[in-house]
Image (spheres, rainbow, N blue to C red):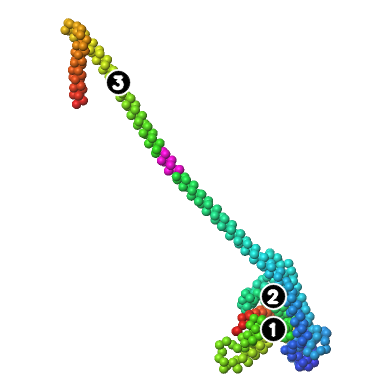
Amino acid sequence: MSADVRTVVAAAADGCEDPHIFNDFGCGFEAPTTSLFFPTPWLDFGLPATSGITKYTALLVVSVLIVIGFWFFTTRRAKVVPGRGQSVAEMLVVFIRDQMVRPGMGKRGDAYLPLMVTLFLFILTMNVMGIIPGAQLPVTSNLAFPAVLALSIYLLWNIIGIREHGFAGHFKGKLVPGGAPAWILPVLVPIEFISNFVFRPVTHAVRLFATMFAGHMLLAVFAAAGFYLFNPDAGGILGVISVGYSGMALVGFLVFTAFELFIMGLQAYVFVLLASFYIGEAIEGAH
Amino acid sequence: MITMAAEQENILRIHWDEFTFGLIAFLLILGVVTKMWPRMTKALDERANQIEGGIERAKKAEAEAEEIRQQYREKLEEAHREYARELEKAKEQRAAIIAEAREEAQTEARRILDAAHAQIEADRQQALVQLRAEIGSLSTDLAGRIVGETLSDSAAQSRVIDRFLAELEQGESAAQQAEVR
């Protein structure tokens, strides 16, 4: 039984003697709440706006170890004739280069390829933590982690833009759209500012966070429902019906788990693709 | 307890400790990937080089083979031409030999024929001379006997004989001509 389900069961058990369908106490279904995303800290720092050492921290460490280990062992002895591990790493790099980096930055993007490979592997691993039994909590469902990455890309975007076009050139290129008549600029510049300098990094982070959050919530609902519906002790036909319901929930859970895996890869792809487009745009200048 | 927690829980929270951990994690991975990066690119570049080198070598070998094939073809053509030339020459030689042999044979035949003619002529002359002498003496004998006197004068004798022979010859050639006709 996964950690999620245990949380749900604990929560449900608080208010009800028998948290199953057809119980004798008249308890309804308690849907899992967002407390799923607030694991109890194992070590609390006691400081404001901190979470302490939680499951997120642990899974973050695991993700880092997995990514570093994967990269280290596949490229440690990179040879002309590649082994299996090296081939996998190379395929991944070529995929990231051709599908994400080159569309956004062209050949110049090859310099940023290590960054993009890092982002992709890191995000994908953090996402996949959501369906690894025992972990079952995508690290990216905590906004802090997507925010770090989006903010890094945001800073890099500004730094590269200023380096390539100068301070004024960068901000002018991003705030004043070429070809716009002068009288509309007082309206346009604030819009561009909010759109490019505020909303864009926020949406970059929130897009990843929100999909992971929602996907995990969905899986938790299926898991909790499956547990709630499973009550063979209800007696007679009711027990059979409850098991049937529970089976349907299980099927839904499995289907959505597969779907989640796809979404996890897709979101990592989207994040890296957008990062590549942003940096490519900073290199290019006016948009 | 759940509701209380839910009130405190803001799903959009960014706690700075988690943020810092995330940053450290990101930089750690970025560091390792960047550190290991040259190994991969080096291997990739080397492989590209080797493949390019292989293609280069293959192209060279192909060109070489083509050249050799060309040479071979030229040689073959040359041999064919040579053969044709030899054949032509042989034909000519054969014709020449035949012509020569024919020429020689004709010459030989003519020579033999001439020699035969000469021989015949010589024999005839000889026979004629002999005959003339014999006929001379015979006729003298005969005339002496008939006339009863000996023609002691040698000059007169030969004059008589010559005249006689000339008459004889004339009659003979006339007879021959008549015969031919």
> What whole-number distance in Å separates the C-alpha atoms at marks 2 and 1?
17 Å
Q: Three-letter amino acid code at disc 3? A: Ala
Rendered view: A109 above or below B124: below
The residue identified by callout 1 is: A155
Answer left or right for B119 relative to A218. left
Residue A198: image quadrant is bottom right
Disc 1 is placed on an element classified as helix
Residue B90 lies within the magenta run:
yes
Disc 2 and disc 1 in contact, CB within 8 angstroms: no
Instruction: Give the letter of the chain under mark 3.
Output: B
Rendered view: B127 above or below A272: above
Image coords of residue B170 (percent x, y): 19, 20
Instruction: Give the letter of the chain under mark 1.
Output: A
Q: Residue at x 25, y 12 (%)?
A: B134
Answer left or right for B91 relative to A231. left
Image coords of residue A266 (percent x, y): 66, 79
Residue A4 lies within the magenta run:
no
- Nearer to me, B68 or A99: B68
Q: Main secondary structure of the magenta part?
A: helix
Q: Which span of residues is magenta-colored?
A: B86-94
Residue A66: image quadrant is bottom right
What is the crowding at mark 2: few (fewer than 14 residues within 10 Å), some, or many (at least 20)?
Answer: many
Closer to the camera: disc 2 or disc 3? Answer: 3
The residue identified by callout 3 is: B122
Residue B106 makes an appearance in the image? yes
Residue A16 makes an appearance in the image? no
Answer yes or no: are tags 1 and 3 on the same subunit. Answer: no
The residue identified by callout 2 is: A114
Disc 3 is placed on an element classified as helix
Image coords of residue A61 (percent x, y): 77, 79
